[in-house]
Image (tube, rainbow, N blue to C red):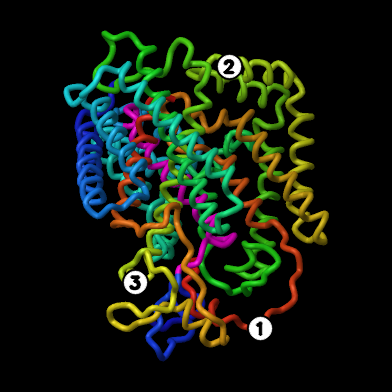
Protein backbone atom coordinates (compact mmCIF):
# COMPACT_ATOMS: atom_id res chain seq x y z
CA UNK A 1 0.00 0.00 0.00
CA UNK A 2 2.98 2.26 -0.37
CA UNK A 3 3.33 4.93 -2.98
CA UNK A 4 4.33 8.48 -3.60
CA UNK A 5 2.31 11.38 -2.37
CA UNK A 6 1.66 12.27 -5.97
CA UNK A 7 -0.38 9.23 -6.80
CA UNK A 8 -4.02 8.98 -6.03
CA UNK A 9 -4.98 6.86 -3.10
CA UNK A 10 -1.42 6.10 -2.10
CA UNK A 11 0.05 6.65 1.29
CA UNK A 12 3.50 7.93 1.99
CA UNK A 13 3.94 5.94 5.14
CA UNK A 14 3.07 2.31 5.64
CA UNK A 15 2.09 2.01 9.27
CA UNK A 16 3.59 -0.93 11.05
CA UNK A 17 0.24 -1.89 12.55
CA UNK A 18 -1.20 -2.51 9.06
CA UNK A 19 -3.32 0.58 9.19
CA UNK A 20 -5.67 1.04 6.26
CA UNK A 21 -6.24 4.20 4.28
CA UNK A 22 -8.76 6.56 5.79
CA UNK A 23 -11.37 8.23 3.65
CA UNK A 24 -11.24 11.99 3.77
CA UNK A 25 -14.00 14.31 2.60
CA UNK A 26 -13.30 16.04 -0.72
CA UNK A 27 -11.02 19.05 -0.56
CA UNK A 28 -11.22 22.02 -2.95
CA UNK A 29 -9.48 20.30 -5.84
CA UNK A 30 -11.50 17.15 -5.41
CA UNK A 31 -14.70 19.22 -5.40
CA UNK A 32 -13.72 20.74 -8.76
CA UNK A 33 -12.91 17.26 -10.07
CA UNK A 34 -16.40 16.18 -9.04
CA UNK A 35 -17.86 19.19 -10.82
CA UNK A 36 -15.95 18.16 -13.94
CA UNK A 37 -17.23 14.60 -13.51
CA UNK A 38 -20.79 15.94 -13.30
CA UNK A 39 -20.37 17.77 -16.58
CA UNK A 40 -18.93 14.67 -18.27
CA UNK A 41 -21.86 12.65 -17.01
CA UNK A 42 -24.21 15.29 -18.37
CA UNK A 43 -22.42 15.10 -21.72
CA UNK A 44 -22.81 11.37 -21.83
CA UNK A 45 -26.52 11.45 -21.09
CA UNK A 46 -27.04 14.25 -23.65
CA UNK A 47 -25.51 11.87 -26.15
CA UNK A 48 -28.46 9.53 -25.50
CA UNK A 49 -31.02 12.00 -26.86
CA UNK A 50 -33.06 10.54 -29.74
CA UNK A 51 -31.62 12.98 -32.30
CA UNK A 52 -28.12 11.67 -31.67
CA UNK A 53 -29.07 8.21 -32.89
CA UNK A 54 -30.10 9.51 -36.31
CA UNK A 55 -28.08 10.13 -39.46
CA UNK A 56 -28.62 13.85 -38.99
CA UNK A 57 -26.19 13.87 -36.08
CA UNK A 58 -23.34 13.15 -38.48
CA UNK A 59 -24.61 15.06 -41.49
CA UNK A 60 -25.90 18.25 -39.87
CA UNK A 61 -23.77 18.57 -36.74
CA UNK A 62 -20.39 17.08 -37.54
CA UNK A 63 -19.91 17.46 -41.30
CA UNK A 64 -20.30 21.28 -41.37
CA UNK A 65 -17.35 21.68 -39.01
CA UNK A 66 -15.06 20.67 -41.86
CA UNK A 67 -15.71 23.90 -43.75
CA UNK A 68 -12.83 26.33 -43.83
CA UNK A 69 -10.28 23.94 -42.37
CA UNK A 70 -7.16 22.77 -44.23
CA UNK A 71 -7.73 19.89 -46.63
CA UNK A 72 -6.23 17.25 -44.37
CA UNK A 73 -8.38 18.26 -41.44
CA UNK A 74 -11.49 18.73 -43.57
CA UNK A 75 -11.16 15.33 -45.24
CA UNK A 76 -10.72 13.56 -41.92
CA UNK A 77 -13.76 15.29 -40.46
CA UNK A 78 -15.83 14.48 -43.54
CA UNK A 79 -14.78 10.84 -43.41
CA UNK A 80 -15.64 10.62 -39.73
CA UNK A 81 -19.03 12.27 -40.17
CA UNK A 82 -19.93 9.84 -42.98
CA UNK A 83 -18.86 6.88 -40.90
CA UNK A 84 -20.88 8.08 -37.94
CA UNK A 85 -23.93 8.74 -40.14
CA UNK A 86 -23.75 5.23 -41.60
CA UNK A 87 -23.43 3.66 -38.16
CA UNK A 88 -25.40 6.16 -36.15
CA UNK A 89 -26.76 3.92 -33.42
CA UNK A 90 -23.61 2.01 -32.59
CA UNK A 91 -21.26 4.99 -32.74
CA UNK A 92 -23.50 7.21 -30.70
CA UNK A 93 -24.03 4.52 -28.09
CA UNK A 94 -20.25 4.14 -27.88
CA UNK A 95 -19.76 7.89 -27.51
CA UNK A 96 -22.35 8.02 -24.75
CA UNK A 97 -20.83 5.09 -22.86
CA UNK A 98 -17.35 6.59 -23.14
CA UNK A 99 -18.43 9.94 -21.76
CA UNK A 100 -20.53 8.42 -18.99
CA UNK A 101 -17.59 6.24 -17.98
CA UNK A 102 -15.31 9.26 -17.99
CA UNK A 103 -17.62 11.04 -15.60
CA UNK A 104 -18.01 8.04 -13.33
CA UNK A 105 -14.31 7.29 -13.56
CA UNK A 106 -13.35 10.74 -12.37
CA UNK A 107 -15.88 10.49 -9.56
CA UNK A 108 -14.58 7.13 -8.32
CA UNK A 109 -11.33 7.73 -6.49
CA UNK A 110 -9.38 4.62 -7.54
CA UNK A 111 -9.79 5.52 -11.22
CA UNK A 112 -9.49 9.29 -11.22
CA UNK A 113 -6.06 9.42 -12.85
CA UNK A 114 -6.99 6.93 -15.55
CA UNK A 115 -10.22 8.75 -16.28
CA UNK A 116 -8.59 12.18 -16.41
CA UNK A 117 -5.91 10.86 -18.74
CA UNK A 118 -8.48 9.21 -20.98
CA UNK A 119 -10.54 12.40 -20.98
CA UNK A 120 -7.58 14.33 -22.38
CA UNK A 121 -7.26 11.91 -25.29
CA UNK A 122 -11.00 11.84 -25.92
CA UNK A 123 -11.31 15.61 -25.72
CA UNK A 124 -8.58 16.13 -28.29
CA UNK A 125 -10.19 13.62 -30.64
CA UNK A 126 -13.60 15.26 -30.33
CA UNK A 127 -12.06 18.71 -30.77
CA UNK A 128 -10.67 17.56 -34.11
CA UNK A 129 -13.44 15.40 -35.51
CA UNK A 130 -16.45 16.84 -33.71
CA UNK A 131 -15.73 20.57 -33.50
CA UNK A 132 -13.41 21.09 -36.45
CA UNK A 133 -10.69 22.43 -34.15
CA UNK A 134 -13.20 24.87 -32.71
CA UNK A 135 -13.34 26.87 -35.91
CA UNK A 136 -10.09 28.57 -34.88
CA UNK A 137 -8.23 27.75 -38.09
CA UNK A 138 -11.36 28.11 -40.19
CA UNK A 139 -11.84 31.62 -38.84
CA UNK A 140 -15.41 30.97 -37.76
CA UNK A 141 -14.80 30.96 -34.02
CA UNK A 142 -16.93 33.24 -31.86
CA UNK A 143 -16.04 33.89 -28.26
CA UNK A 144 -19.71 34.06 -27.36
CA UNK A 145 -20.51 30.73 -28.98
CA UNK A 146 -17.91 28.41 -27.60
CA UNK A 147 -14.48 29.36 -28.93
CA UNK A 148 -11.89 27.80 -28.81
CA UNK A 149 -14.04 24.70 -28.68
CA UNK A 150 -15.71 23.69 -25.44
CA UNK A 151 -14.34 20.17 -25.52
CA UNK A 152 -10.78 21.46 -25.41
CA UNK A 153 -11.50 22.97 -22.02
CA UNK A 154 -12.16 19.48 -20.66
CA UNK A 155 -8.58 18.60 -21.49
CA UNK A 156 -7.29 21.81 -19.94
CA UNK A 157 -9.23 21.12 -16.75
CA UNK A 158 -8.01 17.54 -16.64
CA UNK A 159 -4.44 18.84 -16.60
CA UNK A 160 -5.08 21.62 -14.10
CA UNK A 161 -6.95 19.31 -11.73
CA UNK A 162 -4.55 16.40 -12.09
CA UNK A 163 -4.12 14.71 -8.69
CA UNK A 164 -0.50 15.56 -8.04
CA UNK A 165 1.18 18.13 -5.85
CA UNK A 166 4.01 19.27 -8.07
CA UNK A 167 3.36 22.83 -6.97
CA UNK A 168 2.93 21.73 -3.36
CA UNK A 169 -0.29 21.24 -1.40
CA UNK A 170 -0.14 24.87 -0.21
CA UNK A 171 0.06 26.42 -3.68
CA UNK A 172 -1.49 29.84 -4.22
CA UNK A 173 -4.41 28.40 -6.15
CA UNK A 174 -5.75 24.96 -6.98
CA UNK A 175 -4.50 24.87 -10.56
CA UNK A 176 -0.95 25.47 -9.36
CA UNK A 177 -0.93 22.28 -7.29
CA UNK A 178 -0.72 19.99 -10.27
CA UNK A 179 1.52 21.87 -12.71
CA UNK A 180 3.26 24.48 -10.57
CA UNK A 181 2.44 28.18 -10.35
CA UNK A 182 4.46 29.28 -13.34
CA UNK A 183 2.95 26.77 -15.76
CA UNK A 184 -0.53 27.40 -14.40
CA UNK A 185 -0.16 31.14 -14.97
CA UNK A 186 0.96 30.52 -18.54
CA UNK A 187 -2.10 28.34 -19.16
CA UNK A 188 -4.37 31.10 -17.82
CA UNK A 189 -2.76 33.76 -19.98
CA UNK A 190 -2.94 31.57 -23.08
CA UNK A 191 -6.58 30.70 -22.50
CA UNK A 192 -8.02 34.11 -21.73
CA UNK A 193 -5.56 35.94 -23.93
CA UNK A 194 -6.47 33.62 -26.77
CA UNK A 195 -10.14 34.37 -26.23
CA UNK A 196 -9.33 38.06 -26.27
CA UNK A 197 -7.65 37.71 -29.65
CA UNK A 198 -10.46 35.57 -31.08
CA UNK A 199 -12.91 38.27 -30.03
CA UNK A 200 -11.33 40.55 -32.61
CA UNK A 201 -10.98 38.08 -35.46
CA UNK A 202 -13.09 37.52 -38.55
CA UNK A 203 -16.87 37.63 -38.01
CA UNK A 204 -16.44 39.21 -34.58
CA UNK A 205 -15.26 42.42 -36.25
CA UNK A 206 -18.38 42.98 -38.32
CA UNK A 207 -21.09 45.34 -37.19
CA UNK A 208 -23.76 42.66 -37.15
CA UNK A 209 -21.75 39.52 -36.53
CA UNK A 210 -22.57 39.21 -32.85
CA UNK A 211 -26.20 40.14 -33.42
CA UNK A 212 -26.57 37.40 -36.04
CA UNK A 213 -24.98 34.79 -33.77
CA UNK A 214 -27.30 35.58 -30.89
CA UNK A 215 -30.42 35.91 -33.01
CA UNK A 216 -29.88 32.53 -34.68
CA UNK A 217 -29.70 30.84 -31.29
CA UNK A 218 -33.44 31.16 -30.84
CA UNK A 219 -34.35 28.40 -33.30
CA UNK A 220 -35.82 25.44 -31.47
CA UNK A 221 -35.53 27.05 -28.07
CA UNK A 222 -38.35 27.67 -25.55
CA UNK A 223 -40.33 30.88 -26.02
CA UNK A 224 -38.78 32.69 -23.07
CA UNK A 225 -35.28 31.95 -24.28
CA UNK A 226 -36.10 32.90 -27.85
CA UNK A 227 -37.50 36.21 -26.60
CA UNK A 228 -34.36 36.81 -24.59
CA UNK A 229 -32.22 36.12 -27.66
CA UNK A 230 -34.25 38.53 -29.76
CA UNK A 231 -33.99 41.23 -27.11
CA UNK A 232 -30.22 40.82 -26.80
CA UNK A 233 -29.86 40.80 -30.59
CA UNK A 234 -31.81 44.08 -30.77
CA UNK A 235 -29.56 45.62 -28.14
CA UNK A 236 -26.45 44.51 -30.01
CA UNK A 237 -27.86 45.85 -33.26
CA UNK A 238 -25.03 47.26 -35.35
CA UNK A 239 -22.71 47.68 -32.38
CA UNK A 240 -20.98 44.35 -32.95
CA UNK A 241 -17.49 45.81 -33.39
CA UNK A 242 -17.72 48.01 -30.30
CA UNK A 243 -18.98 45.12 -28.19
CA UNK A 244 -16.22 42.88 -29.51
CA UNK A 245 -13.59 45.48 -28.59
CA UNK A 246 -14.96 45.80 -25.07
CA UNK A 247 -15.09 42.03 -24.76
CA UNK A 248 -11.51 41.73 -25.99
CA UNK A 249 -10.32 44.31 -23.46
CA UNK A 250 -12.10 42.58 -20.58
CA UNK A 251 -10.76 39.16 -21.58
CA UNK A 252 -7.27 40.62 -21.97
CA UNK A 253 -7.41 42.11 -18.48
CA UNK A 254 -8.59 38.78 -17.12
CA UNK A 255 -5.63 37.13 -18.81
CA UNK A 256 -3.11 39.46 -17.20
CA UNK A 257 -4.76 39.42 -13.78
CA UNK A 258 -3.11 36.15 -12.83
CA UNK A 259 0.03 38.15 -11.98
CA UNK A 260 -1.78 40.55 -9.67
CA UNK A 261 -1.67 40.46 -5.85
CA UNK A 262 -4.27 38.56 -3.86
CA UNK A 263 -7.24 40.92 -3.70
CA UNK A 264 -7.18 42.26 -7.27
CA UNK A 265 -6.57 38.74 -8.55
CA UNK A 266 -9.61 37.49 -6.68
CA UNK A 267 -11.67 40.34 -8.07
CA UNK A 268 -10.65 39.47 -11.62
CA UNK A 269 -11.45 35.80 -11.04
CA UNK A 270 -14.92 36.99 -10.06
CA UNK A 271 -15.03 38.99 -13.31
CA UNK A 272 -14.01 35.84 -15.19
CA UNK A 273 -16.83 33.95 -13.51
CA UNK A 274 -19.28 36.66 -14.54
CA UNK A 275 -17.95 36.64 -18.09
CA UNK A 276 -18.41 32.85 -18.23
CA UNK A 277 -21.97 33.19 -17.05
CA UNK A 278 -22.77 35.94 -19.56
CA UNK A 279 -21.28 33.89 -22.40
CA UNK A 280 -23.17 30.78 -21.30
CA UNK A 281 -26.56 32.45 -21.03
CA UNK A 282 -26.58 35.09 -23.77
CA UNK A 283 -24.10 33.66 -26.22
CA UNK A 284 -24.65 29.92 -25.86
CA UNK A 285 -28.24 29.62 -24.57
CA UNK A 286 -27.12 27.21 -21.84
CA UNK A 287 -25.39 25.16 -24.51
CA UNK A 288 -28.69 24.90 -26.38
CA UNK A 289 -29.60 21.92 -24.21
CA UNK A 290 -33.29 22.77 -24.65
CA UNK A 291 -33.12 22.19 -28.40
CA UNK A 292 -32.94 18.41 -28.19
CA UNK A 293 -29.72 18.22 -30.18
CA UNK A 294 -27.07 19.59 -27.84
CA UNK A 295 -24.09 17.35 -27.23
CA UNK A 296 -22.61 19.34 -24.36
CA UNK A 297 -23.40 22.39 -22.21
CA UNK A 298 -20.80 24.41 -24.17
CA UNK A 299 -17.89 26.41 -22.82
CA UNK A 300 -19.56 28.59 -20.17
CA UNK A 301 -19.56 26.14 -17.24
CA UNK A 302 -16.07 24.97 -18.12
CA UNK A 303 -14.65 28.49 -18.19
CA UNK A 304 -16.25 29.00 -14.79
CA UNK A 305 -14.54 25.85 -13.48
CA UNK A 306 -11.22 27.07 -14.81
CA UNK A 307 -11.75 30.40 -13.06
CA UNK A 308 -12.53 28.64 -9.78
CA UNK A 309 -9.31 26.66 -10.11
CA UNK A 310 -7.44 29.98 -9.99
CA UNK A 311 -9.17 31.41 -6.95
CA UNK A 312 -6.36 32.71 -4.80
CA UNK A 313 -5.99 31.16 -1.41
CA UNK A 314 -5.07 33.13 1.65
CA UNK A 315 -1.42 32.63 2.55
CA UNK A 316 -1.07 30.14 5.41
CA UNK A 317 1.75 29.38 7.80
CA UNK A 318 3.69 26.25 6.92
CA UNK A 319 2.23 23.38 8.98
CA UNK A 320 4.17 20.47 10.42
CA UNK A 321 3.40 17.20 8.66
CA UNK A 322 0.19 15.69 9.89
CA UNK A 323 0.32 11.90 10.17
CA UNK A 324 -3.34 11.80 9.27
CA UNK A 325 -2.52 13.57 6.04
CA UNK A 326 0.28 11.14 5.31
CA UNK A 327 -1.96 8.18 5.97
CA UNK A 328 -5.11 9.55 4.48
CA UNK A 329 -6.44 8.77 1.07
CA UNK A 330 -7.42 12.14 -0.19
CA UNK A 331 -8.18 10.81 -3.62
CA UNK A 332 -7.19 14.09 -5.20
CA UNK B 1 -38.96 12.07 -31.64
CA UNK B 2 -39.27 8.75 -29.80
CA UNK B 3 -36.23 7.49 -28.01
CA UNK B 4 -34.63 4.19 -29.03
CA UNK B 5 -36.67 1.28 -27.73
CA UNK B 6 -33.65 -0.75 -26.65
CA UNK B 7 -32.46 2.18 -24.54
CA UNK B 8 -35.83 2.47 -22.83
CA UNK B 9 -35.85 -1.24 -22.06
CA UNK B 10 -32.31 -1.06 -20.69
CA UNK B 11 -33.10 1.75 -18.30
CA UNK B 12 -36.40 0.12 -17.35
CA UNK B 13 -34.63 -3.15 -16.56
CA UNK B 14 -32.17 -1.32 -14.34
CA UNK B 15 -35.01 0.44 -12.53
CA UNK B 16 -36.90 -2.81 -11.98
CA UNK B 17 -33.74 -4.39 -10.61
CA UNK B 18 -33.21 -1.44 -8.26
CA UNK B 19 -36.81 -1.64 -7.07
CA UNK B 20 -36.56 -5.37 -6.44
CA UNK B 21 -33.32 -4.88 -4.55
CA UNK B 22 -34.86 -2.16 -2.41
CA UNK B 23 -37.83 -4.40 -1.62
CA UNK B 24 -35.43 -7.11 -0.53
CA UNK B 25 -33.54 -4.54 1.51
CA UNK B 26 -36.72 -3.46 3.25
CA UNK B 27 -37.60 -7.04 4.11
CA UNK B 28 -34.13 -7.72 5.50
CA UNK B 29 -33.99 -4.43 7.36
CA UNK B 30 -37.36 -5.15 8.95
CA UNK B 31 -36.15 -8.56 9.98
CA UNK B 32 -33.07 -7.02 11.61
CA UNK B 33 -35.09 -4.18 13.13
CA UNK B 34 -32.98 -1.55 11.36
CA UNK B 35 -34.63 1.86 11.23
CA UNK B 36 -32.44 4.20 9.21
CA UNK B 37 -33.00 4.77 5.50
CA UNK B 38 -36.33 2.96 5.46
CA UNK B 39 -37.96 6.05 3.93
CA UNK B 40 -35.23 6.25 1.28
CA UNK B 41 -35.68 2.68 0.20
CA UNK B 42 -39.44 2.95 0.14
CA UNK B 43 -39.15 6.00 -2.10
CA UNK B 44 -36.62 4.18 -4.28
CA UNK B 45 -39.09 1.34 -4.79
CA UNK B 46 -41.77 3.80 -5.86
CA UNK B 47 -39.45 5.80 -8.11
CA UNK B 48 -37.98 2.72 -9.73
CA UNK B 49 -41.34 1.21 -10.53
CA UNK B 50 -42.73 4.53 -11.74
CA UNK B 51 -39.77 5.20 -14.03
CA UNK B 52 -39.91 1.68 -15.42
CA UNK B 53 -43.57 2.31 -16.23
CA UNK B 54 -42.81 5.63 -17.91
CA UNK B 55 -40.07 4.10 -20.03
CA UNK B 56 -42.03 0.98 -20.99
CA UNK B 57 -45.79 1.68 -20.70
CA UNK B 58 -46.79 -1.94 -20.25
CA UNK B 59 -44.81 -1.99 -17.00
CA UNK B 60 -46.90 0.86 -15.61
CA UNK B 61 -48.59 -0.35 -12.42
CA UNK B 62 -50.69 2.65 -11.46
CA UNK B 63 -52.56 5.47 -13.22
CA UNK B 64 -50.51 8.63 -13.68
CA UNK B 65 -52.69 10.60 -11.29
CA UNK B 66 -51.99 8.12 -8.53
CA UNK B 67 -48.26 8.23 -9.16
CA UNK B 68 -48.36 12.02 -8.93
CA UNK B 69 -50.07 11.75 -5.57
CA UNK B 70 -47.44 9.24 -4.41
CA UNK B 71 -44.57 11.55 -5.29
CA UNK B 72 -46.21 14.61 -3.86
CA UNK B 73 -46.57 12.64 -0.63
CA UNK B 74 -42.93 11.59 -0.78
CA UNK B 75 -41.86 15.18 -1.41
CA UNK B 76 -43.90 16.35 1.57
CA UNK B 77 -42.39 13.60 3.73
CA UNK B 78 -38.82 14.55 2.94
CA UNK B 79 -39.66 18.25 3.28
CA UNK B 80 -41.04 17.57 6.73
CA UNK B 81 -38.08 15.42 7.69
CA UNK B 82 -35.68 18.10 6.49
CA UNK B 83 -37.44 20.82 8.45
CA UNK B 84 -37.47 18.64 11.55
CA UNK B 85 -33.79 17.91 11.11
CA UNK B 86 -32.89 21.58 10.80
CA UNK B 87 -34.97 22.47 13.84
CA UNK B 88 -33.13 19.87 15.90
CA UNK B 89 -29.67 20.42 14.37
CA UNK B 90 -28.16 21.74 17.59
CA UNK B 91 -28.09 18.20 18.95
CA UNK B 92 -26.27 16.75 15.93
CA UNK B 93 -22.60 16.44 15.16
CA UNK B 94 -21.65 18.70 12.26
CA UNK B 95 -20.55 15.96 9.85
CA UNK B 96 -23.67 13.92 10.50
CA UNK B 97 -25.79 17.05 10.21
CA UNK B 98 -24.51 17.77 6.72
CA UNK B 99 -25.13 14.20 5.61
CA UNK B 100 -28.58 14.13 7.16
CA UNK B 101 -29.74 17.37 5.57
CA UNK B 102 -28.36 16.50 2.12
CA UNK B 103 -30.00 13.09 2.44
CA UNK B 104 -33.43 14.67 2.82
CA UNK B 105 -32.85 17.40 0.27
CA UNK B 106 -31.77 15.13 -2.56
CA UNK B 107 -34.72 12.84 -2.08
CA UNK B 108 -37.00 15.85 -1.99
CA UNK B 109 -35.51 16.91 -5.33
CA UNK B 110 -36.00 13.42 -6.73
CA UNK B 111 -39.65 13.37 -5.68
CA UNK B 112 -40.21 16.82 -7.20
CA UNK B 113 -38.48 15.70 -10.39
CA UNK B 114 -40.77 12.67 -10.64
CA UNK B 115 -43.79 14.93 -10.15
CA UNK B 116 -42.52 17.28 -12.83
CA UNK B 117 -42.06 14.42 -15.30
CA UNK B 118 -45.66 13.37 -14.83
CA UNK B 119 -46.84 16.93 -15.32
CA UNK B 120 -44.73 17.27 -18.47
CA UNK B 121 -46.00 13.95 -19.80
CA UNK B 122 -49.60 14.90 -19.17
CA UNK B 123 -49.12 18.07 -21.23
CA UNK B 124 -48.37 16.16 -24.46
CA UNK B 125 -51.19 14.71 -26.61
CA UNK B 126 -52.01 11.17 -25.56
CA UNK B 127 -51.89 9.93 -29.17
CA UNK B 128 -48.28 11.07 -29.49
CA UNK B 129 -47.12 9.07 -26.50
CA UNK B 130 -45.06 5.98 -27.04
CA UNK B 131 -43.47 5.32 -23.69
CA UNK B 132 -41.60 8.50 -22.99
CA UNK B 133 -41.58 9.82 -26.56
CA UNK B 134 -41.41 13.54 -26.10
CA UNK B 135 -41.15 16.45 -28.42
CA UNK B 136 -40.57 18.65 -25.45
CA UNK B 137 -42.94 20.03 -22.88
CA UNK B 138 -45.97 21.95 -24.01
CA UNK B 139 -48.52 24.06 -22.26
CA UNK B 140 -47.72 25.30 -18.80
CA UNK B 141 -44.59 23.19 -18.35
CA UNK B 142 -42.94 24.71 -21.43
CA UNK B 143 -42.27 27.86 -19.47
CA UNK B 144 -40.47 25.97 -16.71
CA UNK B 145 -37.81 24.23 -18.78
CA UNK B 146 -35.17 25.80 -16.57
CA UNK B 147 -36.47 23.62 -13.75
CA UNK B 148 -35.64 20.21 -15.25
CA UNK B 149 -32.15 21.46 -16.06
CA UNK B 150 -31.72 22.35 -12.41
CA UNK B 151 -33.05 18.91 -11.44
CA UNK B 152 -30.68 17.20 -13.89
CA UNK B 153 -27.57 18.94 -12.61
CA UNK B 154 -28.57 18.31 -9.00
CA UNK B 155 -29.14 14.62 -9.69
CA UNK B 156 -25.87 14.16 -11.55
CA UNK B 157 -23.98 16.07 -8.87
CA UNK B 158 -25.54 13.79 -6.27
CA UNK B 159 -24.56 10.71 -8.28
CA UNK B 160 -20.90 11.72 -8.55
CA UNK B 161 -20.83 12.80 -4.90
CA UNK B 162 -22.15 9.40 -3.86
CA UNK B 163 -19.64 7.65 -6.10
CA UNK B 164 -16.85 9.67 -4.55
CA UNK B 165 -17.99 8.52 -1.14
CA UNK B 166 -18.28 4.89 -2.17
CA UNK B 167 -14.73 4.14 -1.13
CA UNK B 168 -15.66 5.12 2.41
CA UNK B 169 -17.32 1.74 2.65
CA UNK B 170 -14.54 -0.28 1.01
CA UNK B 171 -14.10 -3.76 2.52
CA UNK B 172 -11.12 -2.57 4.59
CA UNK B 173 -13.45 -0.18 6.40
CA UNK B 174 -16.18 -2.71 7.19
CA UNK B 175 -15.23 -2.77 10.85
CA UNK B 176 -15.74 0.97 11.12
CA UNK B 177 -19.30 1.10 9.82
CA UNK B 178 -21.72 1.09 12.70
CA UNK B 179 -18.96 0.87 15.29
CA UNK B 180 -19.83 2.82 18.38
CA UNK B 181 -16.33 3.93 19.32
CA UNK B 182 -13.42 3.82 16.96
CA UNK B 183 -10.59 1.83 18.39
CA UNK B 184 -12.25 -1.56 18.53
CA UNK B 185 -10.17 -3.83 16.37
CA UNK B 186 -11.92 -5.50 13.49
CA UNK B 187 -12.34 -9.26 13.07
CA UNK B 188 -8.85 -9.50 11.66
CA UNK B 189 -7.33 -7.35 14.38
CA UNK B 190 -6.59 -4.48 12.04
CA UNK B 191 -7.22 -1.04 13.37
CA UNK B 192 -8.45 1.96 11.45
CA UNK B 193 -5.91 4.49 10.38
CA UNK B 194 -7.72 7.27 12.22
CA UNK B 195 -6.98 5.48 15.42
CA UNK B 196 -3.43 4.82 14.41
CA UNK B 197 -2.82 8.47 13.69
CA UNK B 198 -4.46 9.56 16.89
CA UNK B 199 -2.47 6.98 18.82
CA UNK B 200 0.69 8.42 17.32
CA UNK B 201 -0.33 11.80 18.64
CA UNK B 202 -1.30 10.34 22.02
CA UNK B 203 -4.94 11.27 21.63
CA UNK B 204 -7.98 9.25 22.66
CA UNK B 205 -10.02 7.69 19.90
CA UNK B 206 -13.04 9.71 18.87
CA UNK B 207 -16.48 8.43 17.94
CA UNK B 208 -17.11 7.50 14.34
CA UNK B 209 -19.10 10.16 12.50
CA UNK B 210 -22.68 9.03 12.44
CA UNK B 211 -25.07 9.08 9.52
CA UNK B 212 -28.69 9.97 10.05
CA UNK B 213 -30.05 7.47 12.53
CA UNK B 214 -28.15 5.54 15.14
CA UNK B 215 -28.40 1.99 13.77
CA UNK B 216 -25.72 0.68 11.44
CA UNK B 217 -26.17 0.72 7.66
CA UNK B 218 -27.18 -2.40 5.75
CA UNK B 219 -25.15 -2.83 2.56
CA UNK B 220 -24.34 0.88 2.21
CA UNK B 221 -22.43 0.50 -1.05
CA UNK B 222 -25.32 -1.25 -2.77
CA UNK B 223 -27.65 1.44 -1.48
CA UNK B 224 -25.37 4.11 -2.88
CA UNK B 225 -25.17 2.21 -6.16
CA UNK B 226 -28.95 2.15 -6.38
CA UNK B 227 -29.07 5.87 -5.72
CA UNK B 228 -26.50 6.51 -8.45
CA UNK B 229 -28.45 4.39 -10.94
CA UNK B 230 -31.66 6.21 -10.09
CA UNK B 231 -30.07 9.63 -10.45
CA UNK B 232 -28.67 8.78 -13.87
CA UNK B 233 -31.93 7.28 -15.12
CA UNK B 234 -33.98 10.16 -13.79
CA UNK B 235 -31.54 12.62 -15.35
CA UNK B 236 -31.89 10.88 -18.70
CA UNK B 237 -35.66 11.05 -18.54
CA UNK B 238 -35.60 14.72 -17.57
CA UNK B 239 -33.30 15.51 -20.49
CA UNK B 240 -35.92 14.00 -22.77
CA UNK B 241 -38.40 16.59 -21.55
CA UNK B 242 -36.03 19.56 -21.71
Q: What is the C-alpha distance between the residues marked 3 and 1?
A: 30 Å
Disc 1 or 2, which lies upstream in sequence?
A: 2
Quadrant occupied by the C terminus of chain B: top left
Say what secondary structure mark 2 lies in: helix
Q: Is residue A292 left or right of residue A30?
A: left
- Give the magenta range: A23-52
* Residue contact between numbered discs 2 and 3, judged by CB atoms under 8 Å: no
Q: In this view, does A314 lie to the left or right of A69?
A: right
Q: Mark 2 points at which residue?
A: A224
A34 inside magenta stretch: yes
The answer to whether one can see residue A58 in this image is no
Q: What secondary structure is found at the residue carrying circle 1? A: loop
| Front of the two marks 2 and 3 | 3
CA separation in Å, label 2 and label 3: 54 Å
Q: Residues within 10 Å of mark 3 (few under 14, many from 20)?
A: many
- Residue that extends furthest to the left in the rendered view of this protein: B58
Amino acid sequence: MGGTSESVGATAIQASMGAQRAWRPPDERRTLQLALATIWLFDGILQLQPFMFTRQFGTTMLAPTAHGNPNTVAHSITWASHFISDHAVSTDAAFAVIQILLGLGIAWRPSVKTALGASIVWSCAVWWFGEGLGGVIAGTAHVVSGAPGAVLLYAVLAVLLWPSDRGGPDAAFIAARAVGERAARIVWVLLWGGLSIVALLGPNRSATGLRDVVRDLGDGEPRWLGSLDQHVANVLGHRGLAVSIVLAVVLGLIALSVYLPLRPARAMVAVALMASLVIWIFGENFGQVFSGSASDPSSGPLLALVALAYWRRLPQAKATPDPCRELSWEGA
Amino acid sequence: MPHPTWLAYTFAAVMVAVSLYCIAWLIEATRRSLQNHMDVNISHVAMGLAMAGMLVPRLNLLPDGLWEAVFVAIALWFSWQGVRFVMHRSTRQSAGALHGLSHYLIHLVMALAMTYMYLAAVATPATARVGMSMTGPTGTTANFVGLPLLFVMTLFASAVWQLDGLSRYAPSHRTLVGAGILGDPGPDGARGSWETARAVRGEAPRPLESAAGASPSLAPRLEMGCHIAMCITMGYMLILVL
